[in-house]
Image (cartoon, grey):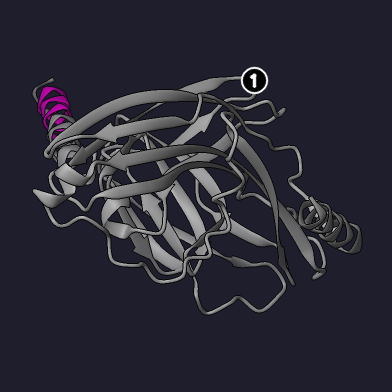
Amino acid sequence: MVNKVAHLLAVLLLLASVSLVHCDIGIGISGNNHEIDIDAFPFAYSSSFSIHNPGNEDALFSIRATGPYEDVTSWVSIEPAIVSVKAGGYSDISYAIEADEGYGGAYELYLVATCYGDGETEQTPSTPVSYLQTSGTIKLTINVSESAGAMSRGLGHPKPPLVDDENTGDADTNESANNVEANTFEAPPYINIPKEVRCGTTVPIEGGCLHGETPHALHFIIHTPSGDTYERPLETSIEFDDVGEWHALLALDKQTIIGKQIMVVEGCNDASTMPLILIGAAICVCCIVAYRRKRSSD
């Protein structure tokens, strides 16, 4: 209890000492913690929960699984992993556990849904800026029986390296946990990218910190409608070759700071447009030639 109060006071002091922007974000999770028993491998399980956006603005959410054992965490798949939720709206999130092999024992995993501020900022003078992130957490307890472990990889899992995950939260009760985290920059981070582009076009994007030094480790994480994720430098070009919601996230090391949604709509790319241009030009030339012949015959 003392640690929680001290943590809360530290966050309040931090917010009081810096300019706070993009604070109108929040998250709600409809879903309970689950305890799952594995008596034999291979094993499959699926379920779902909902995330809510109680704020007054559209918000970007990312959902991931985390825990001390990477091989156990790899059992979990989440769909969608990144989603934009309108103000007052919600989105259903599905997750599945598919385990082909494993060790016996009890494992705790956390499904962490994080809400990010929008990537648009006003070009204000260089002052320390605090960006709030809110996260909701659901805990999964996976119990692998001794017999299942003995017939697979072993009775007990080797001890994992020390893990200090900032978003695991306190999920000891049968309710999802909510956390607030403040990220402070000497200058406001930003993402410069259109809100809507046509499919098949290549668009330059950039990000960084306004009026200040940009950390070298700052980079983009791009998420496509098909679920692919890849990293890009701060000044780059992206070919939007798939219709739907794209997401550009600004990340420092493994921590995402802000994000922005890009809607890619149906459109003609350069290759399909060129024949139409040539046909139109040919029709114009034919009309001009026919008009001149008619005048000369008159």
Residue marked by disc 1: 88
State which region is magenta: 285-295
**Front-most of 5 and 199?**
5
Instruction: Give the residue displayed 82% in from the left and 67% down from the top.
Output: 125
Q: Quadrant of the C terminus?
A: top left
> What is the chief secondary structure element of the magenta stretch?
helix
The answer to whether 28 appears left or right of 105 in the picture is right
Where in the figure is residue 70, as x and y percent of width and height?
Answer: 31, 59
Give SS at disc 1: loop
Where in the figure is residue 193, as x and y percent of width and height?
Answer: 50, 51
Establish if 138 lies above or below 74.
Answer: above
Instruction: Give the residue displayed 83% in from the left and 61% down from the top.
Output: 10
Query: Is residue 166 rendered magenta in the image?
Result: no
- Residue 186 sits in which quadrant? bottom right
Where in the figure is residue 94, as x and y percent of width and height?
Answer: 35, 27
- Residue 269 sits in which quadrant? top left
Q: Bin the neighbour count of mark 1 within 10 Å (Cα to Cα): few under 14, some 14-19, many 20 and up.
A: few
Answer whether residue 248 is visible to the viewer in this image. Answer: yes
Give the residue type that dot 1 points to: Gly
Establish if 243 lies above or below 160.
Answer: above
Instruction: Give the residue displayed 20% in from the left and 38% down from the top.
Output: 98
Where in the figure is residue 191, as x and y percent of width and height?
Answer: 56, 56
Looking at the rendered structure, the number of numbered marks drawn on it comes to 1
Answer whether residue 92 is visible to the viewer in this image. Answer: no
**Front-most of 10 and 83?**
10
Instruction: Give the residue displayed 45% in from the left and 24% down from the top.
Output: 49
